[in-house]
Amino acid sequence: MTNSKSKFLHPSHFERYLPQEEMLETKKKQSNLVIGLPKEASENEHRVCLVPDAVGLLVQNGHRVLIETNAGKEANFSDFEYSDAGGEIIKNHDEIFKADIIVKVSPLNLDEINCLKSRQTVFSKLEIPNQNKEYFKRLTEKKTTAIANEFIKDQAGSFPVVQSISEIAGNYSIIIASDYLSNAKFGQGILLGGVPGINPAEVVILGAGTAGENAARAALGLGAFVKVFDISISRLRKLQTKLNNKIYTSVFQPSILRKSLKTADVVIGAIRSNECKAPHIVSEEIVKEMKAGSIIIDLSIDNGGCFETSELRTHKDPVFIKHNVTHYCVPNICSRIPQTSSIALSNFLTPLLIKIGEEGGVNNLIKKDFGLRNGVYLYNGKVVKQFISNQFNMPFQNIDLLFDTLPG
């Protein structure tokens, strides 16, 4: 009797049936990467790009992963977990930056850029509102290929990192808003969802994208009265279908928006710009008309904020009161829930790194994969994003025209 297990072949067995030239091509393409995972330098960043399970998968695929000691500590991942997964724990901070590929959450600071060798690849956030010309100048001198995680597209043309983080941020923004709203010092001392005989709080959400959708779902789940504004009727219609709830929706009609903000207890700003700055949807004049003790959560602060009164804050000093309205404007809001956010980042980066290895290196995949190419803002030290060139007065080169310089 035939063994049933013989019907299921390990992937490597299929190589036996490939023509010899195809086998040679497959082996030629495969590249073993050295990936560096440094400890985040910012006190306000508690996430890590790769979790231990991801490191184990990368090692199984033939790659080396160098992890700076305590890189995952703030997200409750120990050095032992990384070591047990096959990662190499490195105590020397500078040594991490000698890897072929550096993966970080926050952009490199100038000291970290100094640690780079020539022609490395760096995956991180860009955070364009927080950058200056010196940042780009130093990276160009190192001939760095810099890739912004938030600009990478998937096959459907969406931004998977932004979508994943926005889901978390949208949900969590309502928890934060509820906490401050119930606080007598910063809010009105009221419960977001109300109770029988007492009206629920009114939550206004600006933007019907992923963050806005998840904020609306969380607010409805707590029993709040929800209004959502967006520039697109189509997005508002899709939102109502997804939520299966006839919530109040409107396009950005100035008079209607102003009236809604006057009665709002919580306002969530979830406007996203795909490149530079988010537009200021709410002026300071309108903020002055809002209720005393109402709460603004500006999820767009990563892109400059969508309230004219927004000011960049940190997790140590997250809120300020202006015109009797409490503002929460922390750019890396997901860092407050670091393990969940780290897993989300890791779920995206791990298969991408494996694919880079399979294609024989970053350059080969950039050449083939439009989605990854969209994330590149510096290629071998050349500025390949027009908005960076315009904002910082730096020479621009079209990345498509640079392909002739890529290795074959």
Image (cartoon, helix red, strand yellow):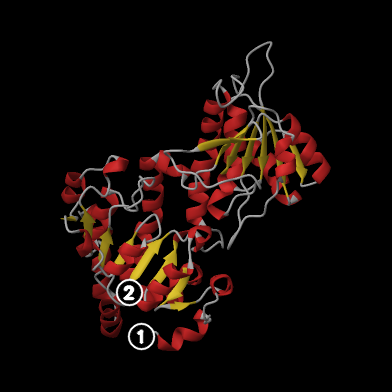
Crowding at mark 1 (Cα within 10 Å: few <14, some 14-19, many 20+): few
Residue 195's tag is: none
Give the image location of residue 226, x and y in percent: 68, 32
Position in image of residue 31 (x %, y %):
27, 73
Q: How crowded is mark 2: few (under 14 residues within 10 Å), some or many (20 or more)?
A: many
Please name whichever residue, 244 or 233, is drawn nearer the observer in this view of the structure: 233
Judge by depth and name the residue closer to the eye, 215 or 190: 190
Q: Disc 1 on helix, strand or loop?
A: loop
Amino acid type at mark 2: Gly
**Residue 378 % position (x, y):** 44, 73
The tag earlier along the polypeptide, 1 or 2, is 2
**Which image quadrant for residue 177?**
top right
Residue 253, compared with residue 97, is above or below; it is above
Where 231 sits versus 13, above or below? above
Q: Quadrant of residue 407?
A: bottom left
Lateral position of residue 179 relative to residue 362, left or right: right
Q: Residue drawn at (70%, 44%), measured in percent from left and top?
A: 284
Considering every residue shown, the one lying at the far bottom of the view is 404
Residue at the image point whose x is 67% and y is 27% from the top: 292
186 relative position to 82: left or right? right
The residue to which callout 2 is attached is: 361
Residue at the spot 66% in from the left edge and 21% down from the top edge: 200
Dot 1 and dot 2 residues touching (CB under 8 Å): yes
* Mark 1 lies on residue: 407
Note whether residue 365 is visible: no
Q: Quadrant of the C terminus?
A: bottom left
User: Which element carries disc 2, helix, strand or loop?
Assistant: loop
Residue type marked 1: Pro
